[in-house]
Amino acid sequence: MTAAPTSPLVAEELAPFAVRRFTVEEYRRMGEIGLLTEEDRVELLEGWIVPKMNRTPLHDATVELLDDGLRSRLPALWRIRIQSAITAIDSEPEPDLAVVRRDVRSRLSRHPGAHDVALIVEVADTSLRRDRFKVEIYGRAEIPVYWIVNLIDRRIEVDGEPTGPDTAPGYRRRQDYGPGDSVPLVIGGLEIEQIAVRELLP
């Protein structure tokens, strides 16, 4: 597999932590043979093995609010995974929350891929810059909808219409929703309902 070009942000922020770029298969193999363990707290972003950001109490409490706010609204065929890996083209990030197809047994030997995922949510305080960079990763992988719950500016940044593996990957549409707005919950291409942003923010 040929890795996608590295963006300037990756080179600046992530490269100092990496020895070289790895494929998803190489990264998984390191886990299988014990070179990487859960204690390492890393993820694969555009071929770089990078440390995961430290999580604050506010961050983790917001993930719980999102779980409470979304779980009961999901259609029967969908479920929530929290801080678990998904597989993209040259990355294996562990988003704060992902809405995936409920068919767990189809994934006993693999992580969910883009065709399994309806929505990815990242909660951003100290990680805002990195989470905005992930627009490229998720857009290239054709994740349908990507939310950044921006705790710094108290809004939800919603990206939709992924480009796929484009020369400038990302999303064609972005809209921000503040505390006085309602954000549309779109699952499988259908708007399920509008959720008050203040219900999801701490």
Image (cartoon, helix red, strand yellow):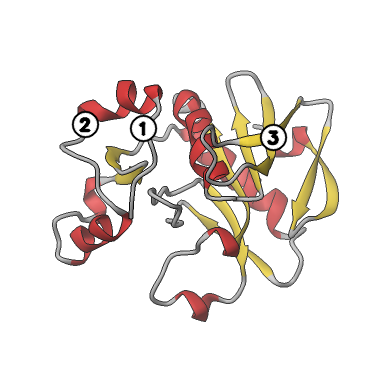
* Residue named by callout 3: 172
As shown in the figure, which amino acid type bears the numbered disc 3?
Answer: Arg
Q: Is residue 80 visible?
A: no
- Upstream in sequence: badge 1 or badge 2: 1
Report the front residue among 130 and 127.
130
As shown in the figure, which amino acid type bears the numbered disc 1?
Answer: Thr
Asked whether, in this view, residue 159 is left or right of residue 27, the answer is right
Asked whether, in this view, residue 87 is left or right of residue 179, the answer is left
Kindly state the secondary structure of the residue where label 2 is placed: helix
For the residues marked 1 and 2, what is the alpha-carbon distance in whole angstroms? 15 Å
Q: Are marks 2 and 3 in contact (CB under 8 Å)?
A: no
Q: Where residue 183 appears, x then y in whole percent?
A: 79, 38
- Upstream in sequence: badge 2 or badge 3: 2
Residue 21 higher or lower than 132, as above or below:
below
Residue at 74% across, 61% down: 74
Q: Where residue 5 appears, x then y in whole percent?
A: 38, 35
* Residue named by callout 1: 6
- Upstream in sequence: badge 1 or badge 3: 1
For the residues marked 1 and 3, what is the alpha-carbon distance in whole angstroms? 20 Å
Kindly state the secondary structure of the residue where label 3 is placed: strand
* Residue named by callout 2: 17
**Quadrant position of the N terminus in the picture:** bottom left
Residue 85 higher or lower than 7, as above or below:
below
Residue 143 higher or lower than 166, as above or below:
below
Q: Is residue 147 visible?
A: yes
Q: Are marks 1 and 2 in contact (CB under 8 Å)?
A: no
